[in-house]
Amino acid sequence: MSLVELIAQADERGLAASGLACLDRCLPLLGADDELLRPLWASLADGSGWGDSLDKARGTLDAEQPGDDEAARLTRRMLHAAPAARTAEAIRPWADACSVASLRIHRLLDPAADGTSADGVDAGRTGDTADLPPLVAAELRRQTTVLEVLAEHGPNGLRRALDLSIEGRRVLRAVVSRRARSGA
């Protein structure tokens, strides 16, 4: 099943986890603490204050900075666009936008890509994964797996979704570090 189809069928918890996971994996671009979004993950598990946790996370990260590149701007926008109401109707467009933004970020940072932000992203989301650069293909797999795990295991799949985010964050942190060392 394609990523677009998985998002269309996901319940509110799956959608919230999907968007949150995309955002979580991109945090290294902002130099944010790895624990910044942990209260949001906890709210998905126990149903507690999504809105309060979201406000705290937003308050920790400033608005766009003059030195932000496109990838950092996309990451900040994911956080600031998150809806306070955790309903499927409110979360679905955000989760979808986070999916696209995260794939574009990975495309921008992929050393095998040509630096453009959109080539192949939409096709990859609908199932055509041919010719995707490695970093983008890996992000697409993580997004798909998060939604599949949550659809299959419900709240019990949250730990696996978080683990996938941590893994993706480490990968992106390594890419950012490598780019900084090479002066790219």
Image (cartoon, rainbow, N blue to C red):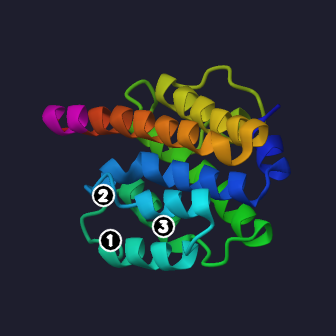
Q: Is disc 2 placed on a helix, strand or loop?
A: helix
Rendered view: 147 above or below 111: below
Query: What kind of secondary structure does the magenta stretch mostly adopt?
Result: helix
Q: Specify which label sits upstream in the sequence, 2 or 3.
A: 2
- Please name the residue that numbered disc 2 is placed on: 30
Which labelled disc corresponds to residue 52?
Answer: none
Which labelled disc corresponds to residue 61?
Answer: 1
Left or right side of 145 for 92 = right
Label 1 sits on what residue type?
A: Leu
Nearest the camera: 67 or 101?
Answer: 101
Label 3 sits on what residue type?
A: Leu
Cα separation between marks 2 and 3: 11 Å
Rendered view: 134 above or below 62: above
Observer able to see residue 145:
yes
Q: Specify which label sits upstream in the sequence, 2 or 1.
A: 2
Which labelled disc corresponds to residue 79?
Answer: 3
